[in-house]
Amino acid sequence: MLHLVLALSSALTAAAQPPDSQTGASRVALAIVTDLKKHPLVDVSADDFVIQEGGTAREILSVRPADYPIIVMLDTGKEGHADFPQMRKAVARFIERIGQRPLVLGTFGNSPKLVTTFEDERRTVMEKLDELEADATAESLLLDGAALAGQTIRTTGTLFSAIVVLSATPVDASRDAPESIAPVIDSGAILHVIANRSIASGGGVRARPALRGLAEQTRGEYTTIYSAASYQAALDRLADRLTSELMIEYLVPVGSKPSDVKIGIRVLGAMVQGFGVAPR
């Protein structure tokens, strides 16, 4: 369980305890540092952080901007057919803002599929995005699309990753089965959902309120919007988060497990929020 350490005094207390000298492996923590007004602070170094595991201070090796892979799944179903150009435009801006990191595009109108790979150059990704269109006859298989993204992420073995799902409908035609959720959880990816709920639900297909819980369980965000024009604002906020995240690598004893991990910051007036710890 990753805990939040907000006060400077907590960081100094951690620093006062000697680090464990029996080291030989490393772990990486994902975190964001902000000021008291929640503005991100990225001009911080390894010397500014303190990390404890089970009350024992760990030696910090490095701090760098997060650059983990991302899969963006677009809703090409019939409900968002008219508004799809705005979704596509918002995704193009999002891709430009998050920098040069591995990124895959996929869709979940009817059968979910990936239209690019992690090996594709950014120019190819943008070209494929521009070619995407919504299908006026397709159902939206939101959860199945997230499952496909999770399966793809898991094969990479990456320490951290994110799945961004853009939904154009309040309902989901995916099958209601644990195997649709398990790939997202097993991948270890952070799930972010931006859901347009401006269209009234109709027919017998149920909405998926559990998706909000899944996003929260993976330390992601579930954002509800009520117009296609709001995709851009929601993705802008998400891009702000992703470009503010830091990866903090620290030494640990061989064979140890992360337990009661606390992250502190020595910068006066700063706060740190953690999103997970992964072995190196």
Image (cartoon, rainbow, N blue to C red):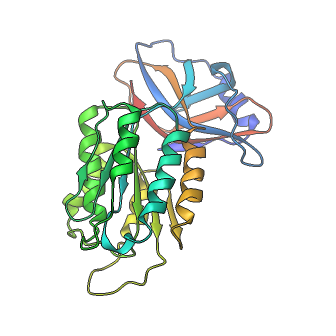
Q: Name above or below for residue 101 compared with residue 142.
A: above
Q: Is residue 187 left or right of residue 15?
A: left
Tell how many labels: 0
Q: Is residue 13 left or right of residue 197?
A: right
**What residue is at 37 percent from the left and 18 percent from the top?**
254
Rendering coords of residue 262 (x, y %): 57, 36
Image quarter where the C terminus lies is top left
Which of 140 and 17 lies nearest the eye of the viewer?
A: 140
Q: Name above or below for residue 63 compared with residue 149.
A: above
Rendering coords of residue 217 (x, y %): 42, 55
Which of 120 and 171 lies nearest the eye of the viewer?
A: 120
**What residue is at 35 percent from the left and 36 percent from the top?**
124
Which of 264 and 172 lies nearest the eye of the viewer?
A: 172
| Residue 193 visible to an observer of this rendering | no
* Residue found at the far right of this picture: 268
Location of residue 140 (image quadrant): bottom left
Q: Is residue 178 left or right of residue 133?
A: left
Rendering coords of residue 6 (x, y %): 69, 42
**What residue is at 58 percent from the left and 28 percent from the top?**
51
Q: Name above or below for residue 259 compared with residue 137.
A: above
Q: Is residue 42 left or right of residue 140?
A: right
* Residue found at the far bottom of this picture: 203
| Residue 279 visible to an observer of this rendering | yes
Rendering coords of residue 93 (x, y %): 53, 47
Location of residue 145 (image quadrant): bottom left
